[in-house]
Amino acid sequence: MTPTPAPTRDRLPSLTGLRFWAALLVVLYHLSRQVGIVPGVSDVVWYGRSGVTFFFVLSGVVLAWTYDGAGVSARVFLWRRFARIWPLLAVSVGASVGVWWAVMDRAVSVKAVGATLLLVHAWFPQPVIFTGGNPAAWSLSDEAWFYLIFPVLLAVLAKRRARVWGWTAVGVSLGALLLWPALSGASATTRTWALDYLPLTRSLQFVLGVVTGLALKHGWRSPVSLPVAVGLVVAWHLVLIPWSGAVPDAVWYSPYSASQLLSAPLFAALIWAAARADLDGRRTGLGGAWMIRLGHWSFAWYLLHEIVIRVAVFEWGKPAPGGETVVFWAGVLVVSLTLAALAYHCVEHPAERRLRSLVGGRRDSARPSADLPAGRG
């Protein structure tokens, strides 16, 4: 296989577009569960928390694609990651805590806020800690762990043969499948934390992304076409609808954890196919100017949308089923996405540029537009 040329910022625009759709999946999941049901839509997105899995796989793909062979030191790499996620994290935590105190008159654990700002909150099994500072930000604790282990993963995997990447992909996928029943005897709280939040568990999805990114970087073709990959992802979420009706979420074999643990290979195939289409010069409908813009806003949207939901429900209560719920949803979507755009342009992007200039000198001009942290839920 012919190695892929070094990436440029807009070389993988379809991945940026996919980020928006994955973030929308998570936002609609929260609207369905925290505000009210919109028939048809809520059925499909009832387990939209799987978007977190998408972002964890995407993170591995893009980091491997970007840094394989780039010769960037671990120190510079980690500083770039800090610059990318921490400023907006801090702002969102401040906003979240401010809403709880000023609007809802609710105290917030100082330990939870500190753990969140230190990016270690997902390591604690207590929900008051891993969702304390900003409930949406738990996934950034996982991302921080991924960043710490990435230089080691790249050093171990980058020079291996493709069959090693393949067996690694199979191994981590089977590992997630085995973890699911292995924790069936644990309490519901422990099982949920260990499967859905714990960075060690979620690392399996990140590693799958890393080996997928290495295969992509070295010119390997996607095993499925983009339309087939999209169809598989949609079909998976449709399968969850009757499963959900048959098994309550509290049961270990419900689709709640399965939707996240078992979707990683499908998302890896989707990301690989979309990136390969970009590299081949094929249009995907995901890389237009507005899709890229929305993809850039998706990180801020994820961190802020639950705060908007919280304020809206507190002020006006949950809407009546039907048209009122649709209007309520629309209002939250517009307001939260507008705030996300402002946060991106006024905080996230300028803060990242400023911080990145302090270590390593020049900005990373080779960073593709999809090189953004994720993890939502």
Image (cartoon, grey):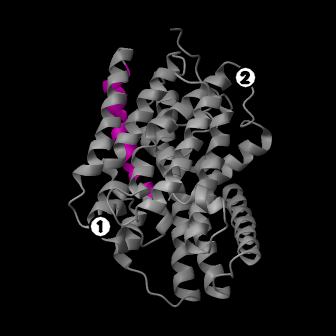
Q: Quadrant of residue 104?
A: bottom right
Is residue 44 inside the magenta stretch? no
Q: Quadrant of residue 150?
A: top left
Is residue 142 inside the magenta stretch? yes
Residue 194 picture location, percent across and down: 29, 57
At 67% across and 35% down in the image, what residue appears? 14
276 w.r.t. 79: above or below: above
Residue 208 picture location, percent across and down: 40, 34
Residue type beneath disc 2: Arg
**Image: magenta residue range:** 139-158
The mark nearer the N terminus, 1 or 2, is 1
Q: Which residue is mark 1?
A: 188
As drawn, the residue found furthest toward the top would be 1
Residue type beneath disc 1: Ala
Task: Please identify the dominant SS of the magenta region.
Answer: helix
Q: Which residue is mark 2?
A: 282
Badge 1 density bin: few <14, some 14–19, many ≥20, Cα 10 Å: some
Residue 112 picture location, percent across and down: 37, 73
